[in-house]
Image (tube, helix red, strand yellow):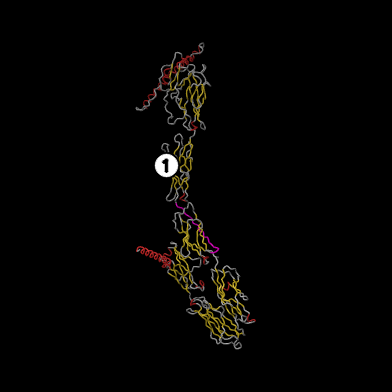
Amino acid sequence: MVAEQNLRGCTQRFLLCFLLGTLWEISASHIRYSVPEEMEKGSFVGDIAKDLGMEPRELSERGARIVSRGKKQHFALSVRTGSLVTADRIDREEICAQSSPCLLNFNVLVEDKMKIHSVEVEITDVNDNTPRFLAEEIELKISEFTAPGTHYLLESAYDQDVGVNSLQGYELSPSHHFSLRMQSRTGGVKYPELVLERALDREEEPVHYLMLTAWDGGDPVRTGTARIRVNVLDANDNTPVFTQSEYTVNIPENIPQGTVLLTVNATDADEGINSQIRYFEVKIPGKISEIFQINPLTGELSTLQNLDYENAEFHEMEVEAQDALGLRSRAKIHVTVLDVNDNAPEVTITSVTNSIPENAPPGTVIALFHVHDRDSGENGQVLCSILGDLPFKLEKKVDSYYSLVIDRALDREQVSVYNITVRAEDFGNPALSTDTHILLQVTDINDNPPTFSQSAYSAYIQENNPRGASIYSLTAHDPDSEQNALVTYSIMESNLSLEASPVSSIVSINSETGVLYALCSFDYEQSREFQLRVTARDSGDPPLSSNVSLTLFILDQNDNTPEILYPTFPTDGSSGVELAPRSAEPGYLVTKVVAVDADSGQNAWLSYHLLKVTEPGLFSVGLHSGEISTVRTFLDKDALKQTLIVAVTDNGEPPLSATVTVTVAVADSIPEILSDLSSQSSPETQDDSLLTFYLVVAVAVVSCLFFAFIVLLLAIRLRKWWMLQVVQAPGDHVGGITSSQFLGIDGVRAFLQTYSHEVTLTTDSRKTQLIFPQPNYADTLISQESCEPKESPLPTQSLLQAKDEQAFFQVDLGDFHE
């Protein structure tokens, strides 16, 4: 129970403190001064700096200034003294007329804090106006039969001052027949009445002159006079009488001009001409006589101008009824103007920011403006709103001030310019509104890195490209603007395999456009692809960047001719020879041409063709296999040596080709080869002795040349063997191939030791078999490393040379297998 009472007491104290703080803040923001009218320009009004809690110098530093609602500004801030002074001479009667008190309201804006202070200055009246009459002479017509005690209403004097400085009373010059009597109407308005004290005698004195003096209560007292002329007439002893002493009417301000508001009516008890009444509006200083008019015959009151509730909420006037002899009476007319919603709200922008960074926090003030509606009641109540779904909101301040602030985070990349429409709408029927447009530019900050459209890129480049050619273009997009969107490109890293060459020697990139250039000519046979990592960096502060990988694929071109692997060209100048037995059946495989192409794809597809043969139609070559086979059986007329030129062509565009010459020796056995060659070397015609002589000489020459050739070949082989022994390391397990040996002129032993074969000899040389091993090459391409040119392990050796034809055979060396 005690805890509950303590809690209740704490709550009450907290609410009391909050209420006192709120009331103090409200009162602190409202400043009031009082100053008399007609002071000189620059006169002191109040110490505004002190009341705002600032030093005088702070008024200028903090941007303090006076803001008003579009009216004339009567005050100014003195930056030097920190005081509020008059901006010109102030006439209270011009500003407030008869209203009291006369208050001038305005606001003081402290720019750096966006804070508004309400200031109210009361203009006190000074006695600067003299009471005056509308006419300098007042004329009265009084019948001589008028009974004493009759009252005559006189013209009233008017004083524009208020309070004690206004009209206080009247005085009449001394007279034996008249006296002055004061009357008061509603509102304290005093008017004089002339009282007849003694009967008049027109024959004795037809005209009486009196002096009426009006005085105010100022110090010193000011007075105004009017002369009264009384003309004595014959009897007309009844004055007009109004049916109402005061007429009232309520009319809306939007009635059309010339509308009849009401009709006044007065009656006169006299008869004849003395009962004829005319109506007149009592003339007073001001503009009321210009707004209304009264029909002198009918008494109808109508409008001369359109009414405006905002200028005057009501109008008061006096109407006078006068008979033919000048007897008059007055009645008061009160016209109340009703407000209609004919004024749209007025929006005055006090302070506004045209640009703001996109990272401005919520709550940042963009604009400060004031809203005012000249209408009253609900017609003058205004609701402000922002049109559309925008990241802004309105906050209401003091004295109908609003601030436009950021409600949520901005993003220039989504919206860079906001056309903010603030609508001020009143509660009238129909409602009126005013739209105010504020153009706000959102400035950029570097909050977006450059981005590529893909996570990785790939490009295809033909080999043998020209140096300096453009090979690819990369583009990164940065949604920022100006310097923050200026992107530069660079190459960061790569996994190039071109003999560890630096990136700068192979490719380069234009830092501004992102175009890649080749600094060298690519070779598909050396490297088929490599990767680069390209970095895009903007020029913001700090800069932002992003990376992307680029894979360059090298496309093959037909730039390599086929390479013949078998049969190989001997390095010693000899020719290779293939053996085919005479008993070979059609389709017998004589040998196989093996070739490779360093290119790839269709550029490496090889085809084989016979370009030239000794015996057409005897041999054929496989189009894709390169196998040389017999087409028919050998005939006796067929030459012992068959020369075939084989062309190897790839499938590129344009195609490239290579040729190889294959020599085929036709014999059933090796001894038969020698015997055939010997028999062919003997003369066919022994009868001709001269021919025999020439043949003998030719054989001798050929034999000498052949012997010299064998000696030279042995020397070359011995030299190669010696060079291999010197070059090879002692621990090398791959030994050289032994050189060929040649024994005897017949060359049989040499042939048997330098060619891998299997021989079966019989007594019948026709049945001797020579089985030559076929090279085991696949039809498909082999790798470049295994097919690089090497020193052939198959040295060649010369065979026999026939006497009748200077032919020789080239036999490839191989490992001899028993």
Counting from the top left corner in percent of width and height, residue 811 is at 44, 21
Determine whether 373 is above or below 213 in the image.
Answer: above
Q: Residues within 10 Å of mark 1 (few under 14, many from 20)?
A: some
User: Which residues, given as a range, are shown in magenta?
Assistant: 428-445
The magenta stretch spans residue 438: yes
Image quadrant where residue 313 sits: bottom right
Give the quarter of the figure containing the C terminus: top left
- Give the residue pinned by disc 1: 493
The residue lying furthest to the top in this view is: 687
Counting from the top left corner in percent of width and height, residue 78 is at 44, 67
The magenta stretch spans residue 196: no
Give the quarter of the figure containing the N terminus: bottom left
Return the residue nearer the eye: 313 or 702.
313
Return the residue nearer the eye: 558 or 450.
450
The residue lying furthest to the right in this view is: 272
* SS at mark 1 in the image: strand
Return the residue nearer the eye: 564 or 227.
227
* Three-letter code for the amino acid on which mark 1 is drawn: Glu
Residue 293 in view (yes/no): no
Determine whether 360 is above or below 632 in the image.
Answer: below
